[in-house]
Image (spheres, rainbow, N blue to C red):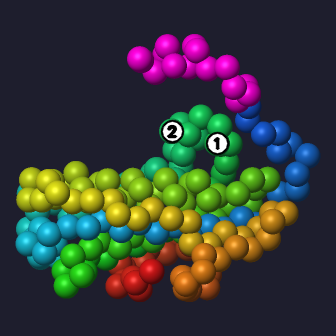
Amino acid sequence: MTINSAIAGYKGTAMKMIDVGEKERTSRFAVARAELKCSRAALKLLNEGRLEKGDALAAARLAGIMAAKHTPHLLPLCHPISIAGADVEVAADEEAGVVRIEARVHAIERTGVEMEAMTAACAAALTVYDMMKRHDRGMELVSLRLVKKSGGRSGEWLRQGEEVRDGEPAPTAPRASKKLGKG
């Protein structure tokens, strides 16, 4: 069965984009995290900057920010929004055998930025995979999760057992990659 035939045969409720036109614009903030399990040998190459394709950590940060901006192009029912700031941090932990990614997105909008943060974290992880696959085909995206969201009618939500530093992304001040806490 092809995707087109599956869609044509779908008899469920029609899909629609939720109307948010009457909602007030408020500050929205979301944090998402991803973890990519890798071999220690591949992570050593990553940390030493010896990957043939270049600086995977910088490429992942940029890919994550770009992905946040393009989320509605990837997720068909996601509203196009004006992102006020986005920041992606990527840290390779050789000892644990994992690359940890944290994406933070902020907007003054009528709808949340959870999907933008999740898309950013996922794209950053996939970029690292792409740049290291020659050295480790067995990498696994073992976690992609929303950690925090704030704003809107539902207010603030924080995933149990996770910690998030205060503050929203600073779009004008580049930040050096920091070692991210285990989540």
Q: Secondary structure at mark 2?
A: helix
Quick check: 42 above or below 81?
below
Quick check: 70 above or below 132?
above
Neighbour tally class for label 2: few under 14, some 14-19, many 20 plus, Cα within 10 Å: few
Q: In x, y percent, where is residue 1?
A: 41, 17
Residue 78's disc number: 1
Residue underneath mark 2: 74
Residue 116's disc number: none
Image quarter of residue 44:
bottom left
Q: In x, y percent, where is residue 134?
A: 9, 53
Image quarter of residue 35:
bottom left
Neighbour tally class for label 1: few under 14, some 14-19, many 20 plus, Cα within 10 Å: some
Q: In x, y percent, where is residue 79?
A: 68, 42
Q: Secondary structure at mark 1?
A: loop
Report the side of 60 relative to 134 (left or right): right
| Residue 60 visible, this orientation | no
Q: Is residue 7 covered in magenta?
A: yes
Foreground residue among 31 and 24: 31
Cα distance between the residues tagged 2 and 1: 8 Å
| Residue 52 visible, this orientation | yes
Q: Amino acid at mark 1?
A: Cys
Q: Amino acid at mark 2?
A: Leu
* CB atoms of marks 2 and 1 within 8 Å: yes
Foreground residue among 34 and 91: 34
Report the side of 59 relative to 115 (left or right): left
Give the magenta range.
Answer: 1-15
Counting the numbered discs, the total is: 2
Q: Is residue 28 covered in magenta?
A: no
Q: Which residue is located at x 46 percent, y 21 percent?
A: 3
Q: Which residue is located at x 41 percent, y 56 percent?
A: 122
